[in-house]
Amino acid sequence: MARQTVPFTKSRIAKLPDEHSAIYIIKTDGGRNNYTGVAKRGRVQERLTEHLATGPDPVPGSKVSIRQAPSIKATNATNASEKAIISRSHPKYNIRGKQR
């Protein structure tokens, strides 16, 4: 899986690869995991933009890390699956049963 960490800004999100699905982690200044999510191929940039302060699902953060995989199935099948990361780090903004 390809990995990349960039500042959590609209201009840097726009430069992230979008051709594969990805697990993403929005981190605080201190590197703490604030939110972990999965985005489908072609929707990585859009999903991260939704988490910016001006978006419909804002999550505070200073940087974002992504791990790409060839498919959502492959993303969730790895050891770094969304559920494993959430259970390990207990991100503040991952709320069980959150309504969308």
Image: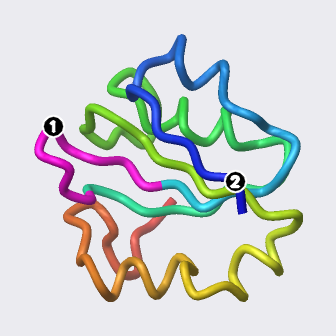
Instruction: Find the distance from the CA under tag 2 to the CA under tag 1.
Output: 23 Å
**Residue 26 percent location from the top left of the image:** 37, 48
Judged left or right of residue 9, residue 16 is right
Q: Nearer the viewer, mark 2 or mark 1?
A: 2
- Going by the numbered disc 1, the residue's amino acid type is Asp
Q: Is residue 62 magenta?
A: no
Residue 2 tag number: 2
Residue at the image point whose x is 54% and y is 11% from the top: 11
Question: Does residue 18 appear to the left or right of 85 in the view shown?
Answer: right
Q: Residue at x 67, y 84 (%)?
A: 78
Q: Classify residue 48 by image quadrant.
A: top right
Q: Secondary structure at mark 1?
A: loop
Q: Nearer the viewer, residue 44 or 17?
A: 17
Q: Is residue 28 above or below residue 56?
A: below
The span picked out in magenta is 25-33
List the single residue furthest toward the top: 11
Percent across and percent down for residue 94 are 33, 68
Viewer-proximal residue among 100 and 85: 85
Q: Picture quarter containing residue 60?
A: top left
Residue at horizontal 19 percent and vertical 56 percent from the top: 32
Q: Secondary structure at mark 2?
A: loop
Residue shown at 62% from the left, 57% from the top: 67
- Mark 2: amino acid: Ala
| Residue 80 image offset from top left, x and y in percent | 54, 79
Q: Which residue is mark 1?
A: 29
Q: Which comes before the other along the chain, label 2 or label 1?
A: 2
Vertical comparison of 67 with 78: above or below: above
Residue 54 image position (x, y, % from top left):
39, 21
Of the numbered discs in the image, which one, if any, rests on residue 12?
A: none
Q: Quadrant of the N terminus?
A: bottom right
Mark 2, other Cα within 10 Å: few <14 / some 14–19 / many ≥20: few
